[in-house]
Amino acid sequence: MNISVPRKKLWITSLATILAFIGLFVGIARTIAQTPPAATPPPRPTPPTRDPHTPGYVPAKELPDGENAPADADGNFILGPMHNSAPEAVEHEGVPKGAVYEFTMDSADSRLYPGIARDPGTFGTPDPSDPAKLVVTTSHPAPYTRHIAVYVPAQYVPGTAAPFIVGADGPDRLLFTVLDNLIAEHKVPAMIAISIGNGSGDAQGSERGLEYDTMSGRYAEFVETEVLPLVESKYHVKLTRDPEGRAAMGGSSGAACALIMAWYHPEWYHRVLSYSGTYVNQQWPYTPAVPHGAWEFHEHLIPDSPPKPIRIWMEVGDRDLFNPNAMRDNMHDWVVANENMARVLAARGYHYQFVFARNAGHTDHSVKQQTLAEALEYLWQGYPR
């Protein structure tokens, strides 16, 4: 059966549909116009290239281009601008390869870190009464999954208590390759490496920031009570309880975390390896006891405390981070922070090696390829091979 619709009625129906769509788009436009744009962190300025001989910086020995610092020497050293990979940074035929295992941990299974996140596109604002305090209002509970890689050297003897190194921002494949070579050369002990991924995000209000920048023993306690028992049970290894046989390493906030682990729990860790350490005012939430976050290490904690049994290897690049515009607290210069660290460690008689790398940015990968083998060899000085 044919049903005929008058043209006038069709025209009226079409007009009504068009008007309805126009109304919908106008409503959406008004909603968008009324929604304030998401806050974004201020743009990070391009870091200036710093001269290691700047007045006020620690005196340091200039090394020939391409050469690393001696693995058995304390003190301050300057790398040249060429950063070629060390032989140990690449795989070699005939070198025994360690086994690498991987697993994940969910936030729901953690008692110490149930999870937080900062809303995308948001940051914080400096407290009007204190520029050293960042106010973050967009952080909230949020789940995460972290990835963990465990390296067990081919030379590990089942049932024996092995030395080990815990690394931040894992998995770190370069670390595993370097360990294969160094262990085979008898330059470091046959150690297990536990490379732990962060809980996501970065800086204040994020899970990573909470884990790595908080000045407390909490992260070391998380590793001790929630990660290490899993590693031992899953892979049938035994980890030493001797702090001389335990090391922590990382880059940026992960480096600050490594030192924080050893500082607050020296009964667990005596060795720290640090690339572009974030020894700046990055902690959140604000803590009155350590109001300047990791800047407190060189401002008060190390100078004002009896020396702790910690050996530390540190690196900073000549173009490392310089971010004065977010808080204007004069505590966001990574080069100055690491120079200050070298000064106070020397004054307090610590065993440390500080490397200032020319032609290098923040956690520079080429510098790490050049120096990681030497850094590990220095770090494990005094431990039986």
Image (tube, rainbow, N blue to C red):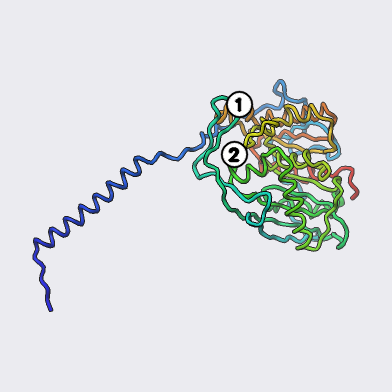
Between 206 and 52, the one nearer to me in the picture = 206
**Position of 41 relative to 225 (above/below):** above
Q: Which residue is mark 1?
A: 329
Residue shown at 73% from the left, 37% from the top: 315
Q: Is 270 rendered above or below residue 345?
A: below
- Residue type at mark 2: give it: Gln
- The crowd level at tag 1 (other Cα within 10 Å; few <14, some 14-19, many 20+) is some
Residue 239 position, x and y percent, is 83, 55
Q: Can residue 282 be seen from the camera position used here? A: yes
User: Residue 176, can we see it?
Assistant: no
Residue behind mark 2: 204
Is residue 187 shown above or below 12?
A: above
State which quadrant residue 136 falls in: top right
Q: Residues within 10 Å of mark 2 (few under 14, many from 20)?
A: many
Q: Position of residue 58 (x, y in %)?
A: 76, 25
The residue lying furthest to the bottom in this view is 1
Q: Secondary structure at mark 2?
A: loop
Give the image location of residue 207, x and y in percent: 61, 46
The answer to which image quadrant residue 231 occupies is bottom right
Q: Amino acid at mark 1?
A: Asp
In the displayed orientation, state which residue is furthest to the top. Answer: 55
Q: Residue at x 66, y 35 (%)?
A: 359
